[in-house]
Image (tube, rainbow, N blue to C red):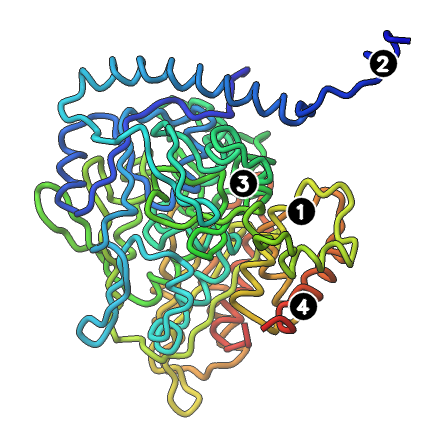
Amino acid sequence: MAVIRDMMPAFELFQPTSVDEALDVLERHDNTWVLAGGLDSMDWFKDRIKRPDVVVELGSVSELTGIRASGDGLEIGAMTSLRDVVANEDVRSRFGLLADAAAQVATPQIRNQGTLGGNLIQDTRCWYYRGGWPCYRAGGNICYAGTPRSMNREHAVTGQSRCVAVNGADTAGALVALGAQMLVRSAGGERVYEAEDFFVGPEIDIERMTVLEPGDLLTHVHIPGDWAGARFYWETARDRKSWDWALASVAAAIVESNGTIERARIAINGVAPTPVRLTDVEDLIQGMPANDDTGMAAGELATRGFKPLRHNDYKVPLARNLVRRAVRGDMA
Amino acid sequence: MSDAEITTETPTGHSRRTFIKGVIATGAVVSSSSHLFRARSLSASAAVRASMPRMISLNVNGVSRSVDVMPQETLAMTLRYKLGLTGTKLGCDRAECGACTVLIDGVSHYGCSMLTNAVRDRSVTTIEGLESADGTLHPVQQAVIDEGGFQCAFCAPGFIMSMVALTNENPEPTREETAEALSGNLCRCGDYNKILNSAMRAAEYARRMV
């Protein structure tokens, strides 16, 4: 595939200053692409795998940036940089789970430019798909990663459908565990989704990672106060300490009283096409002591029914142990 | 005799480097004007025109410079091939290696993965802008020289920009914090120990100056 990769193909660039203006541009044009931090987008453009005619760069839309109090929680603009999320005092003191997850995304330069919204809606890392292979997700008629001889060490161990790619967003699991809501706007109005419903698997739409359709903008993330100050646990297991996605990650918010788990909300990511909320585990551990036995039981239940592919069975004990550690309350 | 004089004489005012830069500048003009015509035919069919001026003003190293920029042009491309600031390197061009690291409003970014049009109203600092007007090196540059921090040094400008961002934000970094701050830059020679030594010395020099 001999292509010149040093300069991106031409596109028309719009830099709106308001959400209304951005939605207007998106409605008037076909084959559009919304650019947030742009770090992933530009790889797609340079590789000629995605070829938008119109790019809408949101860096000038000030209403999408910033973190402010909202009720007893926080509202974070989708264009807020990961750096600002990590540095924010309210996020750190009350919702440290999100700060911990955001702080481990990629590299300093990427966190300085990459946005919370962009991290959440990032496309999957399946390299067959990213390499431009005409798979189901790319509109084709085959999955290259799911065959017995595929290289699928990083792919899904549960929730597979025709596509076996995983969600790689580090902040996604944290926001599911915090019970966040996603605010989406389109020309038709505003919609609100629970974080766990925001991400969609291939059985719903094989070409998308989230509910967002062309013409939709994720504008804000709302974190309710429900889990403020809970015991948080975030851990990502990855090949490299920097610039890497999770092979599996766990995000947990646990409220204890007298050593007993009062309520918990736990999500794992990197193991399925969407972040997976472990509602069964949450029910199981309620009222149980936060110790290793409870952790073991939680880990077993969390990974029950996992169906590894040819090269990723290691992810089953990995996810099991991550959940175990989250529940028993290791220091991350 | 006169032949020998001619062959040994160095042409004055034309180094290999300035010649190459001249060729680059000419090439840039040719390719950008061919794009101009293409852009015109594209936008004629669009319902709304992207009202993006081609000539934009860019604040680089404290100087406001006027430059002709394509919509899809990255900052690293503009710096290197339009403004001749070739200190900013392109390694992977994929936001992975960090050779293109520049500071935008004092914060480190990958120049290869941001549109030049997105930094119009912001202040860009490249490796060329670090030394002071009288030629005194930035404490980070001096520390790198004193420590002999790099082998081939292709990655040096990017590392140095990350070190500058670090010393600005954290005057007394630990070695671990330094490693974390430089984790967005790669050195193919594997000189990480010497680079960390340089960064620690840089922080020391910077503290002494304040």
Percent x, y of residue B114:
42, 40
Q: Chain of mark 2?
A: B
Marks 1,2: beta carbons within 8 A: no
Which is nearer the N-term, disc 1 or disc 2? 2
Q: Which residue is mark 1?
A: B156
Q: Which residue is mark 3?
A: A309
Percent x, y of residue A103:
47, 62
The span from disc 2 to disc 4 (Cα, nearest Å) is: 48 Å
SS assignment at label 2: helix
The span from disc 1 to disc 3 (Cα, nearest Å) is: 42 Å
Vertical order, B201 against A155 (above or below)? below
Residue found at the very far left of the displayed protein: A188
Task: Tell me the amino acid under the disc marked 1.
Answer: Ala
Q: Nearer the viewer, residue A46 or A147?
A: A46
Q: Nearer the viewer, residue A42 or A119?
A: A42
Task: Tell me the amino acid under the disc marked 2.
Answer: Glu
The span from disc 1 to disc 2 (Cα, nearest Å) is: 39 Å
Are the numbered discs 1 and 2 placed on the same chain, yes or no? yes
| Mark 1 Cα-neighbour bin, 10 Å: few <14, some 14–19, many ≥20 | many
- Image quadrant assignment for residue A172: bottom left
Q: Which residue is mark 4?
A: B205
